[in-house]
Image: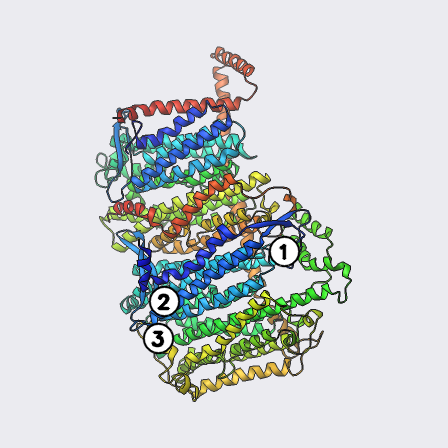
Amino acid sequence: MDLSAFFSNPNNLAWLIPIGPLLAFATITLITNKAKMVPGTSSEYTDHNHPAYPGIDVPMVANWSRAASVIVGLVGIGAAWLISLIVIGQATGLHELGHDILASSITWMDTGAGGFSLGTMVDPLTAAMLFMVPLACTMIFIYAVGYMAKDPRQARFFSMIALFAGAMLTLVVADNLLLLFVGWEVMGLCSYLLIGFWFEKESAYKAAVKAFITTRIADVIMLLGIAYLYAATGTLSFREIVYNTEVLEGLAAMPAIILPGLSAASLIAIFLIIGTVGKSAQFPLHVWLPDAMEGPTPVSAMIHAAAMVSAGIYMLIRMYPLLQAGGDAHHGVFTPPLLFMAIVGSITAIFAATIAVAQNDVKKVLAYSTISQLGFMVAALGIGAYVAAAFHLLTHAFFKALLFMASGAVIHGMEHGEHHVHAHGHGHDDEHDEVHVHTPALTAHAESAHHEGEHGDAHDTHNAHGAHDAGHDDAHHFDPQDMMNMGGLRRTMPVTFITFLIGGLSLSGLPFITAGFFSKDEILADAWYGITHGYGPHALVFILLALAAFLTAFYTMRQLGLTFWGEARSEAAKHANLGKGLVSFTMTLPLIVLAFFAVVAGYIGVHPDLPIFGAIFSPNGNPFHHFIGPTLAEEPGSIPFDWMPVLTSIAVGLGGLACGYLLYWRKPLVAGQRDPLIGILGEQMHTTLKNKYYIDAIYAAVFVRPALWFSKNVAYEFIDKGIIDGFLHLLARVFTWLGDFIKTLNMWLIDGVGDGIPELIARFGFWLRGIQSGRVQQYMLIITFVLLVLILIFALSTGVMQAAP
Amino acid sequence: MNNIIGVDILSFLIISPAILAAVLLFVPNKWVARVVALVGATFIGGVSAAVFFAYNSTIPGYQLELAVPWFEALGASWHIGIDGVSATMVLLTGILTPLAVLISWEVEERVNVHMALILFFETGLMGTFIVLDMMLFFLFYEVSLVPMYFIINQWGGPNRKYASTKFFIYSLGGSLGMLLAIQLIGGSSGTFDIVALSNPTTGWPAFTGENGTFLGIPVETVKTLAFIGFFVAFCIKVPVWPFHTWLPDAHSEAPTAGSMLLAGVMLKLGAYGFLRIVIPFFPDIWANPITIVGIETTWAQLFAILALMGIVFGAFAAFGQTDIKRLVAYSSVNHMGFVALGLATAALVYGESVLKGSVDAQMNQSGILATNGAVLQMFNHGLSSAGMFLLAGAIYHKTHTRDMTQYGGFWVKAPIYGGVFIFMSMASLGLPGLNGFVSEFLVVRGSWMVFTVITALAMIGLLFTGSYILKGIRMVLHGPFNLHWKDYNLEITPREAIAIVPLMVLILITGLAPNWILSVINATVTRIFGG
């Protein structure tokens, strides 16, 4: 195949987009990731996340390898970004993007008389994603250069994150559900590997397993949906299904194969939505996402903004015509999938927002905020706010990526400050430096060894022992992510403060100047439109989302106040900063870039009738609406302007910000002071929220532990070892007994007759024993074997000899 | 192309390993034995690859076919030939044997005998996949049993006597029924030719005896008895739940090469037997309604339920293990369950199409895809399970324990091994982009329309596949490095790496572009279903 001719056709160009990161992954994994050996106690290797290993050398990335891998990773994602921009240019140059698309496919596998095609496609939705994803990914990559600069496995990190980006881009350009699912699952793997990147820490690998298994619950159901869709329509191509009203009507009219009462379209849609409930962390499968914070911060940004969770929403937006087949939310006709989304989404939005209010971990607040915002999008789709969901997906990606990376900068700064405190002996003896620097790592080490499980064996004690040898001291454990230890960081980390503030205000929906305001407002506007027509689900969504928006603004203000305002509440916070040089630069640049988009991205989707702003940004109608609309065969109608949702948005946004301001900014917390929220909510309520409504504990008791118990005791010990093997052993015993019985019978009967024969055998045996030093078995083996070969060759020879010409 | 040194190429594939094995018995030097075995097995592997690629999937029927009389008095003949399914299995055998030989270089005692047994085993496998005569089929099917028994019995782990005896007696016991069934069919129809007997209008399915009886017994009963004979034999081999308990013992006690071939190829003998004999011979038995304790069902549905049990309980049992080889062994029960589910779908669709003359296009397509999936899953599981056993064996060989609770944090000291382990685990898990996903998806797609509820329940097994795979990774690689092993070199050795790279490459290629092999399978399967 002539490659240059192939790729000079713009239709085929999209194939190249994921290739860059994927090649980077392959190159780093196979070529540039090379280790050097360092002592297991070297300060190059050990830190918070890597325990010390006295007495051995451990491999860590070589210096040249670190540099080369970082460069390969950046080049890979940079290429993807560049090609994406070219593809977007080509696509928008089409006469009527949406009706016309860029598409290219190949026959991937034979299926009976036909074949299954698979390929790439660029329509308006893909183009919008291609604007956001590579941009956010590139920023995350740049950020990771600095953030992971001291990590002993940075090359591996870049290879995994490159695969992650490659999988997300595959998902975005896929023209069918199967290829989308490939990207979807590979991303699942990458998130597993990256959440558990610091795999020596118990909390990290547990979180990784949790993320993978929780999403897999949803994925296996989604797989059924894909299989069913494929069975029912004979294709998985997006265009042939969701752009084809005939297919959709057929599916809507066909009764489902199980669960009578539902249409085939509804059942498939529900299966697919469950996939998103897992991937985009909706209630009740949201539990993996807060734990995913165990990964390095660039991963959090990747999972929460650019890739993973966006993929779930993207898939729903992509499949939307199928989800509403047979119904029309805009006219109050709800299909079961639509209702399902409206309910799950709005409940998740409010539920996660309430939890976020009571968290003290700077990243956990953001994690619950992500869950809540994804709930906004799912709920929006449930009430037919198709464009609004896509809009919020984009703006959220920008400000949430920003917030995560800014929080990572805060954590990094705090660790820096902590290190500074020790290095300069604030309150500690200099001579104990070495010990204290290693303390957290050793603590983690000992803890994980301790929790290793019920098999209290040599391994555990040994590890714990090693940790004690090296000077284990549990008393001093410092959590650089705890906002209670922060405060006043605006002074030492001004750029982080300002960008965090911009991201936070965008998330809160500060009216008229932030992206988050416009996208959230559009969802509420759609919900309000439904209310004015008397549709119940719209009302539910409107009320719950408005409340959630209020809480969002509040907890964001709380977070900003606790982190940056007031005075430092710990020595570390006093000295927190990013330092100078490459680390500081690579970590700050992405913040500034994303802060820009966190503000301006909203202006592409302003309602044309909004006073002043509409006239400036949408003189010819809502540009984003115009752009995304043609993704669907039947373009979604735009709704008339109404003041009510706008005022609601303003009220909840400003109201939440004001409450947060009153509690956490006007009188900032001082060291040791209780969170004023406890006084307002009451101790019990606050504890419940802080413990996430105890859902993790409930799941552990209801699902995890029983599954473990069942596997070991029922499936293996009882059924296999007990019943089945028990039966076999019984059978064997019966036959042995029968054999013995017959043998005895024979001896008794024939003893006299065949006296001579056993005699002969015994003599032969004696002679045999003489010549072979007791290894009867071996010789028996050889004899049997030779005999078998001879018999076989003899038996076959008849046929083969005649066969030979 | 059809001849190698005067011997027909398929016959060569069958006989040459046995001859090489016989030669090896007289090679006393262990290094010479190792090299001879490897070179020989690689050459045979090359020939089998050549056979696979020479096979032209556009031509109907069997290829490289040869039929010469053999034991004419019995009506048996040396009838060999391949279609897309057997070509795939021949390729798999050809690929895995040299890799197993390379891995068994780690054996230090009686090296030549060990190598000879592996090659002799290959003869049994190749023969079973290539022959088209039931007598020969049975001969090779049994021949494969003996060397594997000795491999486990002589070079196995601590509990090898129990495991090998259980394996041997169980398999042999299963085959007795099959032998009777073969005699029954051969005796009544006067031929052992599989091709002739498979024909739905002139072969065994159309057999009516004399006035509906054979030897005074109703033909229906005769057929059901013959069916059960085959069914049980192949269920033990696959293994289908609840005939599977020999497998975890045999696999975990066998030496690494033994486990690789056992899981990689030997289990496929059973699945292949279903495809080659049980499905074409007994369409009416599979699809006709039967009543068991008042519930109307079909044999195909019962088979699907057993497959489901294997998928679900196999996954659970694997999840309950702390012995790494047992975990991988149970994963075979889980994965072969998907093969069985695909076969059950195939059996029902084929059975109905023979009974009713035809089935609707939707059903037929489901049957084709499920069968495609089952055959591809046989190939895929061969690659990934061999790889998993290789890796489990590698770590066992170094640490001399299979107890995963003694492991921990090996990724710190063995980064390459860790990466390969994760890759293989993901292949086993069925990660999209790797081979296992394609076949599992096809099976799920095919069986969904036929056995909807069973397929839905099978998802529980698929979920727990994830759980036990991650448990394996967690216990071997994750956590702080267990300093007990600080003086051990745990990293993958070059020899192990050379053996596993071909598997990884094939896994990746098949995952990304399955058509290189699926087109061959699909062509044959489509013709079976009259497409």
Task: Tell me whether marks 3 and 1 sit on the same chain.
Answer: yes
Residue A481 visible from this viewpoint: no
* Along the viewing direction, whichever of B243 and B56 lies nearer the viewer: B56
* Along the viewing direction, whichever of B39 and B524 lies nearer the viewer: B39
Mark toward the viewer: 3 or 2: 3
Q: Measure the C-alpha gap from mark 3 to mark 2.
A: 23 Å
Mark toward the viewer: 1 or 2: 1
> Disc number at residue B60?
none
Q: Residues within 10 Å of mark 1 (few under 14, many from 20)?
A: many
Pointer 3 or 1: first along the chain: 1
The chain that hosts pointer 3 is: A
Q: Amino acid at mark 1?
A: His
> Disc number at residue A50?
1
Q: Amino acid at mark 3?
A: Gly
The reply to whether the C-beta atoms of the residues labelled 3 and 1 are less than 8 Å apart is no
Q: Answer left or right for B123 relative to B251.
A: left
Mark 3, secondary structure of its residue = helix
Picture layout, residue A417 above or below residue A510 = above
Residue at 44% x, 46% y is B504
Q: Measure the C-alpha gap from mark 1 to mark 2.
A: 49 Å
Mark 1, secondary structure of its residue = loop
Q: Residues within 10 Å of mark 2 (few under 14, many from 20)?
A: many
Q: Position of residue A610 (x, y in %)?
A: 42, 87
Residue B82 visible from this viewpoint: yes
* Along the viewing direction, whichever of A685 and A14 lies nearer the viewer: A14
Pointer 1 or 2: first along the chain: 1
Pointer 3 or 2: first along the chain: 2
Task: Tell me whether marks 3 and 2 sit on the same chain.
Answer: yes
Picture layout, residue B8 above or below residue A593 = above
* Along the viewing direction, whichever of A38 and B509 lies nearer the viewer: A38
Residue denoted by label 3: A629
